[in-house]
Image (cartoon, helix red, strand yellow):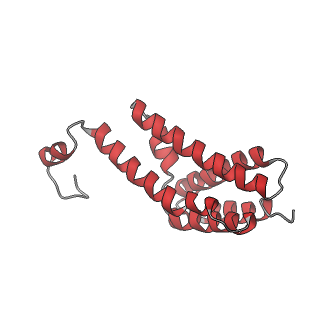
Amino acid sequence: MQRTGLERASLYHYFPGGKTAAAEAVLEDVLEQLSENVLATLTSDDPPDVRLTRMLDATSKFYNCGNDLCFVSIFAIGADSESLSNSLRSAVATWLTSLEATLSEAGRANAKELANAALSCIQGGLVLSVAQSDPTPFQYALQYLRSAMSTSS
């Protein structure tokens, strides 16, 4: 209410389903931005190593260099809505699948494990950055992933 300047009744007019409907709308917007700005980098016609670098660059920008909260932790904790849970699960699965495919195309035999480790590293770096009020852990995570996902390693 404070951020929008709207009164409670006005918010419920736009979101008759209450907090859950508002959260679903926010998550839908976040996932659309993720798809357009991060996931799209993994499905271009560029070579796999270029796509991986662009995905990490886009991830950094998407999360404001580690200064923004992690959407996974925001929506995963206390997601009492089946719709929220399903949307979140689908988004993570899409990111993992796209990343795994790109890593596999890059010749990484351990593509599935590396894709899971990469998302864990990204999300963990974000959580640590928020906990410490310092974006450095997220930035370190991306720096590490640049090396770990390099096709020359």
Seen from the viewer's position, the closer of residues 149 and 142 is 149
| Left/right of residue 20 with respect to residue 105 in the rendered view | left
> Residue 93's quadrant in the figure?
top right
Q: Looking at the rendering, which quadrant does residue 9 occupy? A: top left
Q: Tell me where residue 59 appears, x and y as whole percent.
A: 58, 62
Q: Nearer the viewer, residue 11 or 50?
A: 50
Using the image, determine if residue 26 lies above or below residue 52: above
Q: How many marks?
A: 0
Q: Residue at x 51, y 63 (%)?
A: 37
Q: Horizontally, is 63 left or right of 18 in the view?
A: right
Residue 128, image x, y percentages: 59, 53
Placement of 80 over or under 12, stated as above or below: above
> Which quadrant of the figure contains the C terminus?
bottom right
Camera-side residue: 152 or 46?
A: 46
Q: Position of residue 126 (x, y in %)?
A: 57, 55
Above/below status of 45 relative to 14: below
Residue 137 image offset from top left, x and y in percent: 64, 60
**Quick one: which residue is furthest to the front in this view?**
45
Left or right: 97, with 7 as reference point: right
Residue at x 24% of width, y 36% of height: 17
